[in-house]
Amino acid sequence: MTGKPLRIVFIGLSLSSSWGNGHATTFRALMRALQRRGHELVFLERDVSWYARNRDLTDPEFCELRYYDTVADLLGRYGATIRSADAVIIGSYVPEGVAVIDQVAGLATGRLCFYDIDTPVTLAKLSAGEHDYIANRQVQLFDTYFSFTGGPTLRRLEREYGARRALALYCSVDSDRYRNTGEPHRWDLGYLGTYSPDRQEILERLLIEPARRMPGRRFVVAGPLYPPEIDWPGNVERIEHLPPQDHPSFYSRQRFTLNVTRADMIAAGWSPSVRLFEAAACGTPVISDVWNGLGDFFPLGEAILTASSSAAVVRILQTTSSAARAKLAARALTKVLAEHTAAVRARELEASLAPQCASALVSANVGEHAF
């Protein structure tokens, strides 16, 4: 760490529960890495019943985790904490986010940042006039708008929405926790993700239909909220919820894992899923759907394979040798350890919060920023 330790307050969707959301995994990895670098962290979470019933992290060792019931309760109980913080980072999908942002912007004396873990979805909502957790007028309130999506979206945030400074802060993996477990392979292809209507057609094409065509192979889909009417082939195993501590074992038991991207993120490009980095850290080669920017994270054909059709997936599973899979996995692992660990993201966030970094970037008036 350079400079003095910072007191950083996060206000996010959830840290305590990974059920049905990818935010918790992202926050946990990033905050663990920040705490290791000496920073003092507080996470403020709305106490909602669906996460309260499914909490898998109740007493984190890397931060203070506190709950609030309403916006008024947030301000009444934690107003002083927010006011004294060196930085306050508000995440996407925070309940009553518009009210939270307005109130916190009036309290914060340090840097005020937004961390959009759903940037293409956010911009689609703003374009449609939907202000579930941030309003158009609020984008310019933040010193830095951190985005899960890079590429041209960063320039769009600045030019169309008035963001003072848009930076890519991609998801990451905790490389101390995500490693190959050495367990024997159980599945030829697996997928981990909550049900989403706009991903389901791709999942059907790239996993369910290949499973039908390859009845002698084994497949798995883990994640909640899948409708009961889905016709799962008999060789597709279903796991309703897989807590983060079980992810390394899950990936390690797959010959390949599948990455499926939401439609808004495919359209935006440069929107890697945390599952890409988790699988790579566990030494599991990835088959991904196709989108702009993917090759910036993993060289195509060298560290990751892509598929657009059921036939392409079947061909990969039938023709890729163990040696070829091992080479793919090794190259992806090297890339992740160098560029996409939580430790790397913590250094990037730390640097962005440094006053000299902020002033230099503002004076340079750079249109598109990415770490």
Image (tube, grey):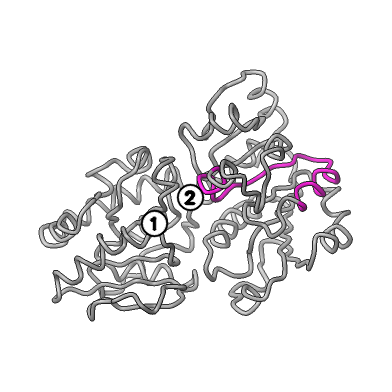
**Which element is circle 2 on?**
loop
Q: Which of marks 1 and 2 is nearer the N terminus?
A: 1
Q: Which amino acid does label 2 sit on?
A: Thr
Identify the image quadrant of residue 209: bottom left
Residue at 67% x, 57% y is 94
Question: As rendered, which of 169 and 68 lies closer to the eye?
Answer: 68
Could you say which disc has been placed on residue 301 in the image? none
Highlighted magenta segment, given as a residue range: 99-123
Q: Are marks 1 and 2 in contact (CB under 8 Å)?
A: yes
- The residue at the far top in this view is 364
How many numbered marks have been drawn onto this rendered protein structure? 2
Q: Is 143 rendered above or below residue 183?
A: above
Residue at 42% x, 73% y is 226
Distance of label 1 from label 2 (alpha carbons): 9 Å
**Is residue 68 part of the magenta span, yes or no?**
no
Label 2: how many Cα within 10 Å (few below 14, some 14–19, many 20+): many
Residue at 48% x, 37% y is 150
Question: How far across and down, in percent of the image, does residue 18 sit?
Answer: 55, 68
**Is residue 118 part of the magenta span, yes or no?**
yes
Question: How far across and down, in percent of the image, does residue 53 sit?
Answer: 62, 79
Q: Which amino acid does label 1 sit on?
A: Ala
Question: How far across and down, in percent of the image, does residue 283 sit?
Answer: 32, 59
Residue at 58% x, 53% y is 30
- The residue under label 1 is 281
In the rendered structure, the answer to whether residue 361 lies left or right of residue 371 reads right
- The residue under label 2 is 341
Question: How far across and down, in percent of the image, does residue 251 sit?
Answer: 35, 66
Identify the image quadrant of residue 319: bottom left
**Split into 4 quadrants, where in the image is the N terminus?**
top right
